[in-house]
Image (cartoon, grey):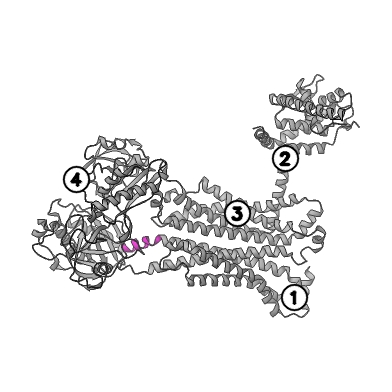
Amino acid sequence: MPREAGLPPGTLGLLILRLLDAGPLHGYAIAQRIHFLSREELSVEEGSLYPALQKLLLNGWVKAAWTTSESGREVREYRLTADGRKQLEAALAAYKRTSRAIGLVLDNA
Amino acid sequence: MAALKRWARRFWSLLNRRRIERELEREMASHRAMLDDPRRFGNELRLREQNADVWGWTWIDDLRQDLRYAVRLLHRAPAFSGAAIATLALGIGASTAIFSVAYGVSLRPLPYPEPDRLVRIYEANRAEGNSKQNVSEAQFFDWRAGAPSLESIALYSSESSRPLPQSHQRVISIGVSPVFFNLLGATPILGRGFRTEKEYGRRTDEVLLSYAAWQRLFGGRPDIIGSRIPLDDDDFFIVVGVMPADFDYGPHVDAWRAGFLRPVTARIVRGWRYDHVVARLRPGATIDQARAELNAVAARLARDYPPTNAGWTVTVEPLRATIIGDFGRATWLLLAAVAVVLLVACVNVAGLLLVRATARERETAVREALGAGRSRLVRLWLAESGVLAALGTCLGVLLAWLGVTALKVAAPPGIPRLDAIAIDLPVLLTSLVSSVAATLVVAAAPLRGSATAQPVTTRLQGGTRGSETGDRRVARDVLVLAQCAGAVVLVILAVMLTRSFARLSSFDLGWNASGVVSLKPEPSMPRTRARTYWLVNWSDRLIAQLEATPGVERAAITTSIPLSPNFFPVLLGRGDAPTGAARRWSGVAHHVTDGYFDVTGISFIAGRTFDSSDRFSEALLTSGSLTTGSLSEGRAVAVVSETLARTLWPGQSAIGQHVRIIIGSVAPPREVVGVVEDLQFHVVGEEPTLHVFVPWTQENIPGHYVLAKVSGDPVSSLPVLRRVVEAVEPGTPVDQMTAMEALVSRATAQPRFTARTVAAFGLVALVLAAIGIYGTLSYLVGARMREIAIRLSLGASRSVIVPDVLRRGLAPVLAGGVIGILVAAAIARTFETLLFQIEPLDATSFAIGAVLLLVAALAAALAPALRVLHVNPATALRAE
């Protein structure tokens, strides 16, 4: 069983937004990308992924639409909205600031 | 903003819940299909639940479940829910209905722009006990010049009524300053308003029609603008405009004449106080400023014109106060009564719920033991009382609607602004607020109980068997106490008002209304000095014809009938005092024919009535010497009322004295030939006014009434009498036909209305309190059944136990009664003005209120207490 190792609460939304910034993706692809890009360190369970996606929908940061994938499957693709892009920038800045701060403390203590 | 969007999306999701769930399903299926091993897909059920959490559906589901459960519970206890819903419906319905009346009458803004700046101005003479006298035109022009805090000020006359030629329709009109409509902020819907005074010369011949008159008299013809209609004597007026339908300033007027343009000093007498004044304050000016300025003017006038103005000051009050009048205070009383009923109703339902909460202790404990959170239990209670309150509110609003419809039908005439009463948004909002408040009050009771409950394990073991916790008993006692206090306050007030009304209606008016009818004929008469004699001649013929009519016992002519707004105010002086600096009194003059005192049954204390010896010759009547005060022949006589006689000649006999009736010009001193008992003439319950009666054959004025005492049914005699009057002088219009008894009952209608309504509320509160006492006491007996059974089986006598049960039940009733009496005593003073010949601390009313509560409480307590007599200890012990 893949674990959701070391993913601090709330960061899943940020990861999804960042992935969608590069282009629309469906749920499975998002999970795959996170797994792949984290060098298989992170793996997102469906039970976390879909509620996170619904939360983004609720906030109006992403939009969803049904399309046919390259492999000919019916998939639901998520796309970043203008609000979502703004949110991504804000969240990214906040995340970087925090992580730098944590890094500083850890390095210099 | 973002939060708002989120809520909008949540709401949208609720409506599209099915679709969202289907999409999720499809999406998961598609996801699963892409996995190498579909079994690796996570827990679908949990995923769906989490999804519902995100969209906030879980909360809604829980609520729905709670509501369903609450409805099921209430359904299972129909007696309880029926009682609770009916109680709440009664309380909310009554409060909504009465609030809609109070709002329509007293609180809704007047239909004019910036109505708070509108004021009415009166002349006042404190020494004569006259705080709101009509205004003399002459004073008006001085006020207009001397009160800078008034933006504008307008004079208007009393109503006058003229028949339209070639029709039986009449037009009621008043003269107004041209600025009148600008001042109020009203504009015509058709034609134009009056021009400014500068554009007119000395006089104008323009009128504005009311919308109703336009429809009724002219069929709503738009070409009415510019046409001529007769209104005042033989003058014609030109219609320049029509006012909108919702323009309704005070009396029901058909037309407004542009008048009161500039002072014609020579002709205006300062003592002629017949007109009315309305004014608009400058923005920022206060009513006190205006009052101070006007009183400064009045003080100057009192110095300059002592005979007519000494002692006269000015009263200024908001227009609203004038329009609402005394009804405002009655309204507040009704509102207070209704608030108490609502409170008693809520308390009652709270008591019922509390009893249920105790009975369901075990169920709650089981729920808690199974892991229900406190908040979930609270929500369950809120849902239950919410359902009760919602049903109660719906029924209550329905009741209110019925009530308002009934009120509008049953309301006595003279309630101002009745049309403005409706169940509309502000009213519905109020009932919504009272409903929410009711829910909270009602729900708070059991919540409080469960918050202080013992540990779950104790309660699971004890259940309903154990004796109840002290806290809850205190809460229930307090509720019973509050109900009884509220009920006793209402009952005492109701008894006081009812007693006051009984006094009012059995009060001796000083005249007899039964079998007396009045008609107002308007014969066309000469406009010269010959008119006085013509009227004498006409009245002789008319009275002879009337008294020859079968069924008519006696007939008379008078210039004023009781309880009608038209009367003839005069100043009175002693005939032996020199004119000028002499003391004057305000009074009312009546010009009457010989039969007047027979018809009205006004009884003589001393002296005689008028007879043929008081007649003046035609020569004297047409010579005009009456107005110069020099009589060459005959004696000018008068009959005066008791109080007048006592006031003008204290300690002396009035017969043979002379009274001077000052109606602007010089008048002859009149010899008093008779003294009659005081009469209630303007308002039922008024202080005695000074009345003077003058023989119609010596002096008369047009605008008179015919009174007849008939032996049969007064109302059915009216058409006959009308035909007789019309026959005496063909072409005479006759209107205002009334039976005097109807006038009397109309005059007492408002106090009767208030007394009955409050009495009804008192009764409702009493019944509610009794239900509450019965409910709690029955429960109490039920809960103590085990204990009672044990005591009985151990040999305790029932005659010991029954009083014990009663004592426990009635202790809070007595405490509540005492508190209620204290509260009633504290607030009774506020309603003093509504009481007639009843002291605010009327011992009888308080005693009756207390006794009624005790009787109701005993009746309610008896049934449960007597149940103890029929208890079989063995059965009772086994039942648990």
Provide the chain ID for the residue under circle 3: B
Depth-wise, is mark 1 or mark 3 nearer the camera?
A: 3
Q: Residue at label 3?
A: B392
Badge 3, how many Cα within 10 Å: few under 14, some, many 20+?
many
Provide the chain ID for the residue under circle 4: B
Of labels 1 and 3, earlier in sequence is 3
Residue B241 appears in the rendering:
yes
Could you tell me which secondary element the residue under label 4 belongs to? loop
Badge 1, how many Cα within 10 Å: few under 14, some, many 20+?
some
The lab-note entry on whether marks 3 and 4 share a chain reads yes
Using the numbered discs, state the Cα–Cα distance from disc 1 to disc 2 in whole angstroms: 54 Å
Toward the top, the furthest residue is A70
Using the numbered discs, state the Cα–Cα distance from disc 3 to disc 2 in whole angstroms: 28 Å
Q: Residue at label 4?
A: B234
Left/right of residue A51 with respect to residue B349 in the rendered view:
right
Q: Main secondary structure of the magenta part?
A: helix
Provide the chain ID for the residue under circle 1: B
Q: Residue at x 77, y 21 (%)?
A: A68
The lab-note entry on whether marks 3 and 2 share a chain reads yes
The lab-note entry on whether marks 1 and 4 share a chain reads yes
